[in-house]
């Protein structure tokens, strides 16, 4: 049976127009050049045209723009090799290796954009070609595309190429598509920046040059996005974190933030805010070790399945044993040497709290009366993130989570999920995150536990979310290796999405650690283990919060809630007295008694983005008050009695949910 292409099918359905970029068949997206699944006809359910302005078309547009960019780069910089060039959430990128290991400048990006416009104006069609693996191997070898050749060897099944351009100057790429019908569809794009990236994200591989860009269906949407990018630059937590003296980094502790005194105040307030909720909602806080015998991580499955992201530690005694083992039986190769080291280096730094919480649960005989048993841990965690993916505080190597684990009976799972969702939504409201998207991530290819266990765990999460009446999406294959999870994605003040909170249903670790509880009839059963976090990584949440509020922390979590500045040194004593009175109400007060002009002091406080500034002079001293300026109202509030400003600040010092 002849298979129809997308173009042929839509033509028969009378849906083919100049603005169609792809066709959807059920849940799958195909470009117009690709033969559709065998048996697809005009009567097949779920067939429809996808137009350029629709959301599903965006990835197709961006992937196609990446191809045009790579074409332009190789025309301008002969001898350049290409690696990967996918569409991503914010746009697209392509990785390159320039001859001699060069880099791209801003001027280069401008030249590349110019060449891309020429290629787009030519309106040349994208053409799909199915090719035998041996033929593809020869083609890529003749082209000198070593990275693509390496990738080819990992591919199985049908191999496809995409070409565009005139026959005498075609650009060809190993690619599975889909793509727009022709380059003329790519009306709105912008190259944004260059970064280094290791081949396949592994720092042991060559460093490549990654050009990022973005593309949209029309210039209006592009302009809106570029405006958002400009706003994002102003809000960048790395920039604001330095300017506001919140965080710092040092090359001797890569991807590990230092919290300055002002940042430490906020960090501790985030932790205390969560601690207060624990007391109300039945959690008990625990402290567990950071370093364990690697036997723990073998039992939990982390060492076999997560070793690349773990830090392993050795004592001098371990190293001595390793040295003797290597001398006694010299290894035949690197793999054998690595195994000897693994066998003798006995310690691992915990990347997660869950294994230690399993140990804690199993330290005594548990009754059903103790369940649900909720324990929370702010223990420091360490994960070896590759240097190509670390970014400020949103991806670090050392962090703490507002991490908790709930051990419960199967019949309690639904209730616990619902309680968690109610609580986490209230938390996000306090931080003014109003747009929350729920995603249920299902079993990955690399996992532990039987399919039956995964079926039960996934169903438990789905029913728990549905019981709360929440809409959700399914992310196939994106669960943790030990269980599926609910992900909570928040949109910040400028519309960017961040994954924060999570709950995971785990039937596997209780089995691996042989955890039990005694039921009312004296029989023993396995508990279910629920992993959950609301902020997620405190470091990541802090970084996102900086950008969400643009450095203007709400009064209740600002490092200083009011700064007192004196008109002259004659009023220093009253300023100190006023500060003590405000501090006695539990407020965070900064006192600026520097022998400088008043305007300079006010400017310094405004640059630190303090919510309130209180001016102290003759009138204020005589009247027992302050002349107050509000950051958020952006105006002077005039003279306010000290007791009144204390009342106002005391109310604003509470999280919104605690104000009556």
Image: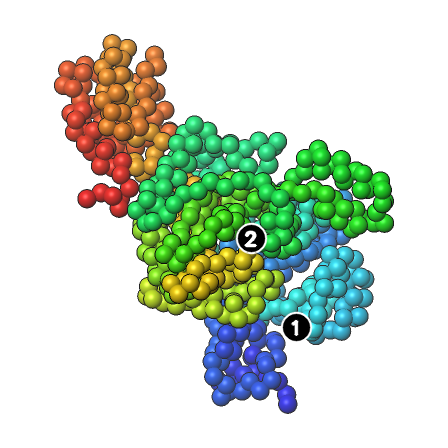
Tag 1 secondary structure: strand
Point 73% across, 56% down: residue: 147
Mark 2 neighbour class, 10 Å CA radius: few under 14, some 14 to 19, many 20 or more: many
Point 79% across, 57% down: residue: 144
Image coordinates of residue 232 in percent, x first then y, are 45, 44
Does residue 232 sit above or below 162 in this rendering? above
Mark 1 touches mark 2? (CB < 8 Å): no
Does residue 452 sit above or below 81 in this rendering? below
Going from the N terminus, do you reach mark 1 or mark 2 first?
Answer: 1
Tag 2 secondary structure: strand
Q: How many marks?
A: 2
Spatial CA distance of label 1 from label 2 is: 24 Å
Q: In this rendered view, identify the residue nearer to me: 149 or 498.
A: 498
Residue matched to label 2: 213
Q: Quadrant of the N terminus?
A: bottom right
Say which quarter of the image contains residue 435: bottom left
Q: Is residue 471 visible?
A: no
Q: In this rendered view, identify the residue nearer to me: 570 or 522.
A: 522
Residue matched to label 1: 128
Point 80% across, 50% down: residue: 336
């Amino acid at each position: 049976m002849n298979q129809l292409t997308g173009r042929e099918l839509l033509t028969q359905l009378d849906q083919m127009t100049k603005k169609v970029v792809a066709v959807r068949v059920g849940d799958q997206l195909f470009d117009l050049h690709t033969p559709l699944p065998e048996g697809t006809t005009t009567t097949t359910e779920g067939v429809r045209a996808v137009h350029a302005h629709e959301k599903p078309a965006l990835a197709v547009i961006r992937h196609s723009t990446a191809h045009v960019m790579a074409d332009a780069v190789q025309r301008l910089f002969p001898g350049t090799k290409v690696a990967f060039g996918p569409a991503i959430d914010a746009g697209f990128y392509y990785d390159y290796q320039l001859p001699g290991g060069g880099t791209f400048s801003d001027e280069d990006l401008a030249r590349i954009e110019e060449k891309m416009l020429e290629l787009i104006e030519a309106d040349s069609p994208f053409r799909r070609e199915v090719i035998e693996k041996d033929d593809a191997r020869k083609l890529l070898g003749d082209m000198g595309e070593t990275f693509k050749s390496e990738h080819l060897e990992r591919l199985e099944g049908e191999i496809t190429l995409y070409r565009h351009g005139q026959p005498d100057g075609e650009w060809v790429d190993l690619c599975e598509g889909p793509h727009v019908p022709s380059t003329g569809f790519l009306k709105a794009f912008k190259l944004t920046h260059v970064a280094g990236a290791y081949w396949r994200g592994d720092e042991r591989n060559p460093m490549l040059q990654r050009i990022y860009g973005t593309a949209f269906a029309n210039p209006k949407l592009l302009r809106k996005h570029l405006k958002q990018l400009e706003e994002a630059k102003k809000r960048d937590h790395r920039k604001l974190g330095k300017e506001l003296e919140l965080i710092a980094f040092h090359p001797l502790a890569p991807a590990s933030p230092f919290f300055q005194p002002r940042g430490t105040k906020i960090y501790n307030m985030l932790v205390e805010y969560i601690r207060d909720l624990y007391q109300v909602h039945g959690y008990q806080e625990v402290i567990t070790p950071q370093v364990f015998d690697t036997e723990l991580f073998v039992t939990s499955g982390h060492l076999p399945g997560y070793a690349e992201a773990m830090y392993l530690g050795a004592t001098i005694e371990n190293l001595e044993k390793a040295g003797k083992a290597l001398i006694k039986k010299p290894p035949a190769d690197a793999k054998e040497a690595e195994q000897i080291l693994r066998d003798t280096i006995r310690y691992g730094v915990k990347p997660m709290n869950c294994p230690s919480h399993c140990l804690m649960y199993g330290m005594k005989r548990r009754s059903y009366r103790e369940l649900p048993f909720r324990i929370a841990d702010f223990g420091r965690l360490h994960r070896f993130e590759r240097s190509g993916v670390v970014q400020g505080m949103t991806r670090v190597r050392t962090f703490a989570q507002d991490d908790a684990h709930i051990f419960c009976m199967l019949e309690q799972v639904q209730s616990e999920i619902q309680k968690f969702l109610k609580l986490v939504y209230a938390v996000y409201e306090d931080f003014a995150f109003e747009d929350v998207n729920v995603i249920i991530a299902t079993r990955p290819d690399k996992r532990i536990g039987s399919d039956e266990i995964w079926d039960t765990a996934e169903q438990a999460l789905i029913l728990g979310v549905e019981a709360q009446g929440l809409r959700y999406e399914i992310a196939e294959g994106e669960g943790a290796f030990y269980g599926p999870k609910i992900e909570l994605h928040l949109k910040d003040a400028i519309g960017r999405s961040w994954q924060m909170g999570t709950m995971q249903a785990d039937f596997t670790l209780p089995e691996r650690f042989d955890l039990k509880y005694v039921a009312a009839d004296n029989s023993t059963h396995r508990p279910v283990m629920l992993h959950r976090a609301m902020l997620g990584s405190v470091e990541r949440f802090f970084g996102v919060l900086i950008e969400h509020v643009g450095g203007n922390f709400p009064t209740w979590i600002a490092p200083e809630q009011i700064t007192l500045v004196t008109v002259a040194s004659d009023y220093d004593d009253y300023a100190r007295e006023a500060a003590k009175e405000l501090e006695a109400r539990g407020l965070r007060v900064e006192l600026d008694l520097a022998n400088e002009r008043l305007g300079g002091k006010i400017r310094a406080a405004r640059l630190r983005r303090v919510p309130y500034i209180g001016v102290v002079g003759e009138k204020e001293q005589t009247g027992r008050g302050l002349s107050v300026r509000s950051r958020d109202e952006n105006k002077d509030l005039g003279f306010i009695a000290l007791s009144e400003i204390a009342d106002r600040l005391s109310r604003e010092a509470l999280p919104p949910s605690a104000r009556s």
